[in-house]
């Protein structure tokens, strides 16, 4: 069982490179997700309300949900960087970002397994070959998956679906939800898949993910519904695909979760 397969099929982390070179002046980055790879030189990470963080040597800096931050560098030497924006689902409500730390710092000296992909990133970042941008973006997508895998396996994820997927028993129930969202799941069904008693499963699930199993089922259904609506699918069709017996029942749940009816959401996305 691959606990990430169904989740990543609908909620794949994506990165888009926008800078590769030597940074020679202070730069501020907006509060969107960012992935930075420092390959050479030094920099100081500055965030409002936090202590400055000196960074020296090849290091990955990952801001999953986005925070305003700045890099201060020595203008004479500068800092060799590859920078990308990160999208963990955004408007579609991707659950991957839940529970990830505000900042992930990975010095390559302490995480040598990441060196091969980082070397490939550098090769494309400073290449003049055709398709460079697309190749670089795909490598960064892969690097993002490795980072998510790393923080889950090392227990750095505090709560949310990734914390649940790090638990072998809960992972079975979560994977079942991800793979069959339209099924009429009950608490007993999911507890049985996890190999736990109903009471123990409900308690453990809530402790790890900060949601009840039924609330997470709803969250996942609405996540998928938002994606389908964004593609212009009719509300009635979407309701059936994510497990609701009627468009009216789906619309009530969608409005409760998102604060607006699904038709408005669809129109807003098409207009945008």
Image: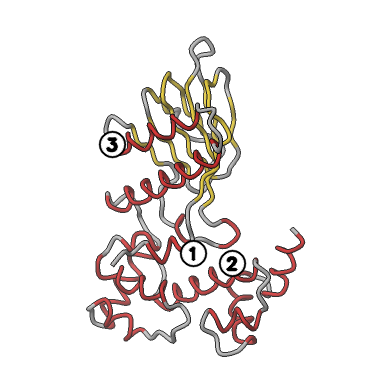
Q: Quarter of the image holding residue 58?
A: top left
- Label 3 sits on a secondary structure element that is loop
Separation of marks 3 and 2 at Cα, in angstroms? 35 Å
- Label 2 sits on a secondary structure element that is helix
Give whichever of discs 2 and 1 has the lower sequence position. 1
Q: Callout 3: 10 Å neighbours few (<14), some, many (20+)?
A: few
Viewer-nearest of labels 1 and 3?
Answer: 1
Q: Which mark is residue 240?
A: none
| Picture residue at 27% right of the left edge, 83% below the top | 192
| Picture residue at 41% right of the left edge, 55% below the top | 99
Measuring from the top left, give residue 258's x and y in whole percent.
61, 69
| Picture residue at 46% right of the left edge, 22% below the top | 43
Separation of marks 2 and 1 at Cα, in angstroms? 9 Å
Indicate left or right for 127 with 29 as reference.
Answer: left
| Residue identifier under label 3 | 111
- Label 1 sits on a secondary structure element that is helix
Indicate left or right for 6 with 73 as reference.
Answer: left
Measuring from the top left, give residue 5's x and y in whole percent.
38, 63
Measuring from the top left, give residue 109's x and y in whole percent.
28, 29
| Residue identifier under label 2 | 227
Give whichever of discs 3 and 2 has the lower sequence position. 3
Give whichever of discs 1 and 3 has the lower sequence position. 1
Separation of marks 1 and 3 at Cα, in angstroms? 28 Å
Q: Check the picture and name the quadrant holding the N terminus.
A: bottom left
Q: Callout 2: 10 Å neighbours few (<14), some, many (20+)?
A: many
| Residue identifier under label 1 | 10
Measuring from the top left, give residue 98's x and y in whole percent.
45, 57
């Amino acid at each position: 069982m691959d606990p990430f397969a169904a989740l990543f099929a609908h909620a794949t982390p994506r990165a888009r490179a926008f800078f590769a070179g030597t940074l020679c002046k202070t730069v501020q980055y907006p509060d969107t997700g960012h992935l930075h790879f420092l390959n050479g030189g030094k920099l100081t990470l500055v965030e409002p309300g936090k202590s400055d963080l000196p960074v020296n040597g090849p290091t990955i800096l990952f801001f999953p949900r986005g925070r305003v931050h700045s890099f201060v560098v020595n203008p004479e030497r500068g800092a060799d960087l590859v920078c990308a924006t990160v999208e963990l689902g955004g408007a579609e409500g991707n659950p991957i970002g839940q529970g990830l730390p505000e900042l992930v710092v990975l010095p390559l000296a302490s995480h040598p397994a990441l060196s091969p992909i980082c070397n490939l990133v550098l090769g494309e970042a400073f290449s003049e070959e055709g398709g460079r941008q697309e190749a670089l973006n795909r490598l960064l997508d892969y690097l993002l998956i490795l980072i998510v895998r790393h923080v889950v396996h090392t227990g750095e994820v505090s709560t949310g679906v990734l914390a649940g997927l790090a638990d072998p028993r809960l992972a079975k129930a979560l994977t079942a939800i991800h793979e069959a969202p339209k099924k009429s799941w009950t608490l007993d069904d999911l507890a049985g898949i996890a190999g736990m008693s109903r009471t123990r499963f409900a308690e453990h699930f809530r402790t790890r993910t900060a949601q009840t199993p039924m609330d997470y089922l709803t969250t996942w259904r609405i996540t998928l519904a938002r994606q389908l609506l964004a593609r212009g699918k009719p509300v009635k069709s979407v309701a059936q695909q994510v497990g609701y017996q009627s468009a009216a029942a789906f619309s009530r749940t969608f409005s409760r979760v998102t604060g607006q009816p699904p038709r408005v959401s669809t129109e807003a996305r098409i207009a945008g």
